[in-house]
Image (tube, rainbow, N blue to C red):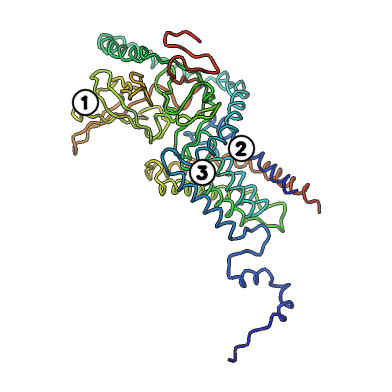
Amino acid sequence: MALDTSPPSSQPVRQSAVRQRERVNRRGSLEPGRPGRPKRPLVVALVLAAVTLMTVDRGADGSPVDPARRAVGEVLGPVQAGVAHALDPVLSLPRWVGDQGDLVDRVDDLEAENAELRQQLARTDVDRNRLAEYDGLTAAAEDLGYAMVPARVVGYGAAQTFTRTVTIDAGSRAGLAPDMTVVAAEGLVGRVLRVTSTTATVLLVVDDRSVVGARLGSSMEIGSLTGDGTLDDDGALDLEQVDETAVPRRGDVVVTWGSDAGAPYLSGIPVGEVTAVYSNVRDMTQRAAVRAYVDFSALDVVGVVVPSGTASDRAVIEPDGALR
Amino acid sequence: MTARRAAVVGLLLVLALTLQASVLPLLSWQGAVPNLVLLLVVAVALVRGSEAGLVVGFVGGLLLDLAPPADHTAGRWALALLLVGVLAGRLHDPRRPRGGSPLAALGTVAAASFVATSVFALAGLVVGDGDLGTGDLLSGLAVALVCDLVVAPLVLPPLLAVLRHTDLEAAPA
C-alpha cells in the first residue's frame, strides 16, 4: 500500500511543458497532440468505410454501389465530354506540327508498308477465298437488322487502375444499354458496361477481364479471345481454341463468334489477325497472339450497335447505311 | 471559413478528375497518366496536416472509384488515398507555413505514388478484381511512379500556393 499516486493537483505545473506528450500517454491512444493530426476514430471509421464499400461492391451485378456510380457519372460525364470537346482543336495541334525526323520516319514507315502491300498483292488468290468467307460473316451481321449510334471517346481509364475502360459521350438517351457491342471503323472495340443518361462506360477487348467468343476466318474454328491488359500494337489479344488440335495460321482473320440475341457481342465483327502461334508441348494446345485491328491508344469515333428502330437523341446509322 | 476551404478543395478535385480522365490520356505514357488526385491529396496533407489529408484522400479516392470510366471494386482508391493523406500529413509542420524543401515534397510524392498504387493493387488482389501478374503489377507501379514524378514539379507548387493562399485568406489572424 505504499503506492504513491500523484494527485491531479500536481499536474498543472508540468502540463505546459509536456502537455502534448501527456495527452497521448494518458489516453493510451495514438491520438496526436499536434494540430492537423487526425483523431483515431476518424481514421478507423474511414478505413472501415472503404473496406465495407469494397465488400458490398463485390457482387458482379446488382451492386448497391451502382446507383452512386451512376449519380457520379451523371454529374462528371457531361463535364468530361464538355472538356474533351472544348479542347479538341488544341489537342489535334500536335498532328499538324512535325519535324524533319518525323517526316523521315514516316517515309520509312510508308515504304515498309508499300513493300508489305506488294507482298499482299501476290497472295491475292488466297485472300480472296478468305475474304468471301469473311464477307459472308459480316453480311450476316448486317442482315440481323441492327443500327449504329455514333459516339466519341471522351475519357480513358488510366493504366494505374489495371483496367482498360473508356467513357463515350452517348448514354441511355441515345438508346444505349449495358452489354451492347461497340465497334470502330477498323473492328471490334468492346462492350458497354453501364450507362448514365449522357455517357456510357465501355470495357475494351484488351482488358484482361474481357473474354470474347471468336472464330477464325479461314478454318471457322471457334475459340475465346482474352485481352492482356496492354494497349500495345502487337499481340494484345490471346486466342485459345476450343479444338485444341486446330492450328491457326499467321495472318488469319479473327472475327467475333457472337452470342445469343447479339449481346454482348454480335457475330462476324472483325477483331484482328493472328500474328504468332505458340504450341504448348505439355498439354498439346495451340495458342495464338492476335493483333487487334483497332488502335486502342488512339480511339476517337466509335459506333454502338443498337436494335434497328431504337429511339435516340442523335442520328442513327441504319444497316443500309442511311442516316435516321 | 471552413466551407470556403472545402469548396476550393472540392473544385480542385473535380478539375483533377476531369483532366485525368479526358485530357492527360492524350499525353499518356504506356497508358499511364499522372494521378492528379493523388498529387492534390499530397498537397492538402502537406499544407493542412493529416486530418485534412485523410478526409480529402477518402473523398477523392471515392470519386476516382465511382467516376466514369472506372470499373473496379469501389473503395480501392478511397483506401489507398486516405492512407496517403495520413502519411503525407505527418510531414506537415505548422511551425513552417512556407513548407519544407521542394526536394522533400518530391520525395513525398514518390512515396505516396508507390504506396497508393500498391495499396490499390493489393486491395484488388484481396477482393479478386481481375487476375494480375506480379510483372504487370511491378511495371504498373514503376510507370505510375515515373508519371507522377514527372508532373509533380509542374503541378505541386501551384497547388500548394493555391491552398496556402486560401488558408491565409480564411484565417487572417
For the point 47% across and 47% down, the residue is A54
Amino acid type at circle 2 is: Ala
For the point 57% across and 36% down, the residue is A72
Dot 2, how many residues are within 10 Å of its Cα: few (below 14), some (14-19), or many (20+)? Answer: some
For the point 67% across and 39% down, the residue is B11
Task: Say whether mark 3 and mark 2 are on the same chain.
Answer: yes
Amino acid type at circle 1 is: Val
**Chain name for mark 2:** B
Front: mark 2 or 3:
2
Q: For the residues marked 2 and 1, what is the alpha-carbon distance in whole angstroms?
A: 49 Å
Count up the numbered dots: 3
Dot 3, how many residues are within 10 Å of its Cα: few (below 14), some (14-19), or many (20+)? Answer: many
Q: Is residue B112 toward the left or the right of residue A63 in the image?
A: right
**Residue A39's x, y, as percent?**
62, 60
Instruction: Indicate the secondary structure of the residue bearing disc 3.
Output: helix
Tell me whether circle 2 and circle 1 mark residues in contact (CB < 8 Å).
no
**Chain name for mark 1:** A
Amino acid type at circle 3 is: Leu
**Residue B71's x, y, as percent?**
47, 37
Q: Which mark identifies residue B16?
A: 2
Dot 1 corresponds to which residue?
A: A247
Q: For the residues marked 3 and 1, what is the alpha-carbon distance in whole angstroms?
A: 41 Å
Q: Is residue A272 above or below residue A164?
A: above
Dot 3 corresponds to which residue?
A: B145
